[in-house]
Amino acid sequence: MDVELAEVRAFLAAHEPFASLPASVLGQLPSRLQIRYHRRGTQLLTAGQPNNVLYIVRSGAVDIVDAAGALVERTEVGGSFGASSLLSRSGSLYTITTIEDTLLLVMGAEVFTHLVEHHPAIRTYYAELGRDRLRHAVAVKQTAEDRSAAWLRMRLDEMTSRRLVTAPSHITIAEAAQLMTTHRVSALPVVEQEGLVGIITDRDLRSKVVAAGVDSSLPLEHVMTRDPIRVSPDLQAFEALLEMTSRGVHHLPVVDRGRLVGMVSSGDIMRLQQADPVFLVGTIAKQHDVDSLAALSGRTALLVDQLLRQDASAADIYRLLTTVADGFTRRLISLAQDELGPPPCAWSWITLGSQARRELSIGSDQDHALVLEDTNLDEAAQQWFSDLASRVTDGLARCGYRLCDGDVMASNPAWRLTVPQWQVQFSRWINEPHPDAVLHSQIFFDARTVHGDPLLLEQVRRDALSLTPGAQRFLGQLAAQAVERQPPVGFFRGVVLARRGDQSESFDLKGEGLHAIIELARVHALAHGLDAVGTLDRLHAAAQATGASSLDELADAFEFIGHVRLAHQNRQAREQRPVDNVVRADELSSFDRRHLKDAFSLIRTAQEGLSYAYQTHLMN
């Protein structure tokens, strides 16, 4: 092999997807390529022009623009273009122009087709769509870290092999206690005809029998917990742990098609991974003052660090961080009520935004509100709720949750309203969609009850959702906001490239990536009156309602960008730097840059579809 061919081989071996080719194939490939040189400003292809070659950039760079003149991609050294028109055997979709003096390696259609047909790495890289590559990248992200915690995804039916000990409801309390002692179990499911009717635990025996002085000769049914929470055998250990911590229980009966098949305890899961900081959640409810709660808040960063090293998805981590925040909120409310006394009427504490969607990240701020039942509250009652809101808001701030810059918090009287007042407010927001109204409605459409009567929020949401499907002006304004801020095109020589061709050293993973998906999901859900709140739930529900598979594909983009964001924030937390969403291009691996570009492409396509549907270019 002469020197020039050897240099070409070394170049190909350093760039994907050719680096994955067998050595024998890679050695023969350079002699089957042509080398072409083009001066800056040369138009290599125009939109609609037939193309029968693959171009590989050896030096220089080219711009790829669409029919409207918008930049789609800037391809630099090691990149390639022309594959889509080669595979589709149609004209080029884009106009491609050199922006520097450029040296190209040119591969003919016959050679390219042979590589695609015989080598999976080439086929995956070129023949699969960006969404398929992204789905694979998500899977890699979730398995590339430390595999020592495969327990996170272990199914409950893999953990419940120990022989199940049960009891009928007619035996005495003393007999049940003896049965638990004999078999060394801390909980006893109560069954009738293989159906679960109750449960008795060690804690129940202490609090309901011994401490209460109940006669142990009474039937077990007098003290058992009736109709306990139950889970299915395909639930993962991680999800079971979240269920336990959110409901304040330590045992979950496992039921399959109405039949009790096992029991899992927090101890079972703890034994799988003794040192995992996830058990922070259970500790929160035991604290007796704000100081002790604040002392626990620093463990959240440790929790994220460990989960990122394990087999946890971004969605799993978001949910756990949300569960922790819910725990802090509930405990602070309980402490405040201990001091303030009973509430003057039925009420509910509503969390808003990312916490409501169960998508809380590191360093998130507070967003919450109160929904009150009574429409005739006197001054003392209003003061009670004002004091409650102030104590909880201040407590959350001490626990690491920043105050909302926009003052969207229950401590603000504007976010402390009765059910009828909220219903009127929503009607006004939807029927008179000025910018502030659209902003506030977006926040409140992402709402979830954390404490109190959930039916109060349900009344407000039900009325609001009944209005949105026909509110075209309101939906149009939401759509306009969803398409206003577009993600970057990709990366070029260590900088971020915007669609206008602007360059910057960094970009906002939330503002220029995740936020667009959140808004797209919200518009589609509200347009169909869907009551889902989480972004992934909304995307999947809207995909089912519309048959649009592109919405399901956005879920992969949401997961991938979210994982990159959490890893970035985790690095900042470990280095004791302020946590933010802004990442430098040179901090990203080539893997992340390549697949972020796929994610950006999916977002832009979804934005273009929504913009066309609502004609957002006609709106102010």
Image: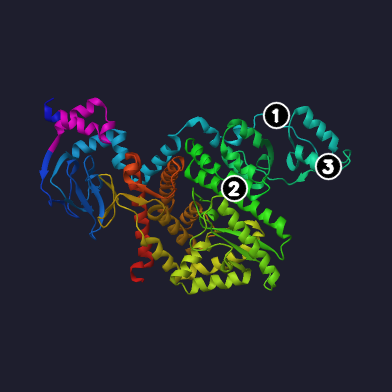
Q: Are marks 1 and 3 in contact (CB under 8 Å)?
A: no
Q: Residue 146: x percent and y percent? A: 47, 32
Tag 2: amino acid: Ala
Tag 1: amino acid: Arg
Residue 75 part of the magenta-drawn span: no
> Is residue 406 positioned above or below 473 on the image?
above
Give the left or right position of residue 19, taking residue 198 as reference.
left
Local secondary structure at mark 3: loop
Local secondary structure at mark 1: loop
Give the left or right position of residue 150, taking residue 456 as reference.
left
Residue 27 part of the magenta-drawn span: yes
Q: Of the residues tagged 2 and 1, which is closer to the observer?
A: 2
Q: Of the residues tagged 3 and 2, which is closer to the observer?
A: 2
Q: Which residues are magenta?
A: 6-34
Q: Earlier in the sequence, mark 3 or mark 2?
A: 3
Local secondary structure at mark 2: helix
- Residue pointed to by mark 3: 211
Tag 3: amino acid: Ala
- Of the numbered discs in the image, which one, if any, rests on residue 482? none
> Is residue 437 positioned above or below 60 on the image?
below
**Few, some or many residues within 10 Å of mark 1 (<14, 14–19, 20+):** few
Q: Earlier in the sequence, mark 1 or mark 3?
A: 1
- Of the numbered discs in the image, which one, if any, rests on residue 163? 1
- Residue pointed to by mark 2: 294
Where's the N terminus, which quadrant?
top left
**Which residue lies at the image location 23% right of the left edge and 28% below the top edge?**
25
